[in-house]
Image (cartoon, helix red, strand yellow):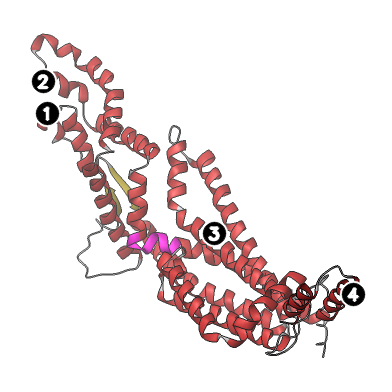
Amino acid sequence: MTPPALSRRRRIAIWSLVVLASVICVLSIVTTWVDRQMFDNHAWNKATTKIVQDSQVQAALSTYVVNQLYDNVDVAAALAQRLPPNLKPLGPPLAGALRDPATRGVAFLFTRPRIQNLIVEASAVAHEKLVNVLENKTGLGISTGGGVVTVDLHELVTEVGISLGLPASALDKLPADAGTVTLLKSDQLSTAQTAVRALHALSAWLLVLVLAMYATAVYLARGARRPVLRNVGWALVLVGLVVLVIRRVAGNYITDTLAAPGYTQATHHLWLIGTAILGQIGAATILYGVLMALGAMLAGPATAAVAVRRRIAPVLNERQGIVWGVAAGAYLLLVLWGGTHALRTWWGILLLAALLAAGIAALRRQTLLEFPAGAQPEPEPGRPTADEQLATLHELHERGAIGDEQYEDAKKLVTT
């Protein structure tokens, strides 16, 4: 019995749900990226490590540190103190001549594990302060310096001064805030805390809303659920592509418009590292969408899909142990691989496992209806039936084209 065609009103409702869910999905991905990048200690430290190991960032950071030293210490006078009296006038030109070599030397220092660890540790401390302030946590022994959260690179500036041979008396005059980068000021605290509460809520519930809207669209498409499921898959592919385009366009805008002169390349690399999670989510969304669309197409009426179902029907219908065993083994390998974030979280592993099981069960129901056990399989398009093949063999045998033995062997192959 052919199911009734969907009414125009229902088709509009289904497409509205799919389109709106896709738009919300983009927003959900962005909020999830910010939440994971900002509030996950592992993600933060991993990104920081990649940043300090990037050559472009090292060059920009070395320039910043040397500038901080020269801006806060009279390097010329400090060098003159270490020169003999008759050479003290060489202090200013020597200080100028040392600036570029100092920058290159600091860039080299940033390749050393000890200096990199110093930066990562400073960033980790600042991140801990920032998260606790934004989430309004108290009683954790974290000082925010009067509501101001900073990254303290003062020790790094001091290290550079020592490497240049500046006397300790000059370095002791460095201001306490030399090399300090402010992340959050007290007058921004209330707004930031409100935004963080909204971010946590959105990242948690927007995905649930998106899945519910897609599921509702499929449910409403009674009699045409497979095409709608296929369209949802392609919608997810489009969402993933939009996210990747947003990442590139926003990165180009920030690099070309907001980056300070001389820091363009470093800013671009910072953006790529900081948005790596966003790119991973976009790629994973494309992957899930393609798998969903291919699954829906496998259940469709296309000739290739029917041929595939015909080939797998005997195993799928009669050897469930093999099917479920192979599926479970393949899925465990995917979990061990952990190529997407969902495969590294308990809820993602359970959700994807449930979807895989539901897909296998639905496909088995379909093959049981199409190719029940013991039924004569339908010939593939363009291939003669068994009766037609036997008639051809009989004709060839009658004409003497094949002998008795060949005729009997061929008959066994056709009828087996």
294 drawn magenta: no
Magenta segment's dominant SS is helix
Q: Amino acid at mark 1?
A: Pro
**Structural crowding at the residue carrying mark 2, measured as other residues with C-alpha within 10 Å and reported as few (<14), some (14–19) or many (≥20):** some
Front-most of residues 383 and 141 = 383
- Inter-mark Cα distance, 3 to 4: 63 Å
Q: Amino acid at mark 3?
A: Ala
Is residue 24 toward the left or the right of residue 11 in the image? Answer: left
Q: Nearer the viewer, mark 4 or mark 1?
A: 4
Q: Amino acid at mark 2?
A: Arg
> What residue is pinned by disc 3?
283
Q: Is label 3 in contact with label 4 (beta carbons under 8 Å)?
A: no
Q: Is residue 297 visible?
A: yes
Q: Is label 2 in contact with label 1 (beta carbons under 8 Å)?
A: yes
- Inter-mark Cα distance, 2 to 1: 8 Å
- Tell me if residue 140 comes above or below residue 266 in the rendering: below
> What residue is pinned by disc 2?
82
> What residue is pinned by disc 4?
398
Labelled disc at residue 167:
1
